[in-house]
Image (spheres, rainbow, N blue to C red):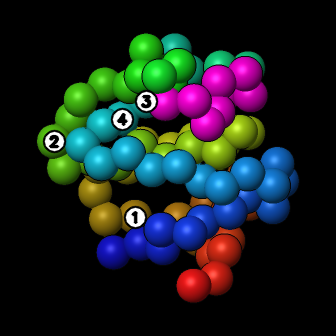
Amino acid sequence: RTCDQLRCTACDFRVSLFNDYIWDQSCDYLFFRNNMPELSKLRVKMVKKKGARAYACQCSWRSISELTDLQTDQQLRWVCGKH
């Protein structure tokens, strides 16, 4: 269970999430900086993986395939955008 209104305080972008996908290992900062939030452009670096979830804003990204507390990741600046 996760917040679906995450927002990044570093780049001020809404965090997008994609069920059953992970990010390709070749992803880098410039890829997300240049392609967020265009899904058609992001798809080239998305890999299908059942049960996983790919998260990204314009400056950070994560692929999660097991229960993970994102608040413990000190590099992420993602907060609940309020409901």
Q: Which of marks 4 and 1 is nearer the N terminus?
A: 4
Q: Quick check: marks 4 and 2 in contact, CB under 8 Å? A: no
Does residue 38 show up magenta in the picture? yes
Q: Quadrant of the N terminus?
A: bottom left
For the residues labelled 1 and 3, the Cα–Cα distance comes to 16 Å
Amino acid beneath label 3? Trp
Q: Quick check: marks 4 and 3 in contact, CB under 8 Å? A: yes
Instruction: Give the labeled residue for mark 1.
Output: 68
Instruction: Give the labeled residue for mark 3.
Output: 23
Q: Which mark is residue 17?
A: none
Does residue 10 show up magenta in the picture? no
For the residues labelled 3 and 2, the Cα–Cα distance comes to 13 Å
Which one is nearer the viewer's eye here, 38 or 22?
38
Give the secondary structure at mark 3.
strand
- Relative image position of residue 65 (x, y in whole percent): 29, 49
Horizontal side of residue 21 vs 71, given as left or right: left
Vertical placement of residue 33 versus 20, above or below: above
Q: Quadrant of the C terminus?
A: bottom right
- Relative image position of residue 45 (x, y in whole percent): 44, 19
Amino acid beneath label 2? Lys
Q: Residue at x 36, y 35 (%)?
A: 22
Instruction: Give the labeled residue for mark 2.
Output: 50
Q: Which residue is drawn at 81% across and 55% down?
A: 12
Horizontal side of residue 3 vs 20, given as left or right: right
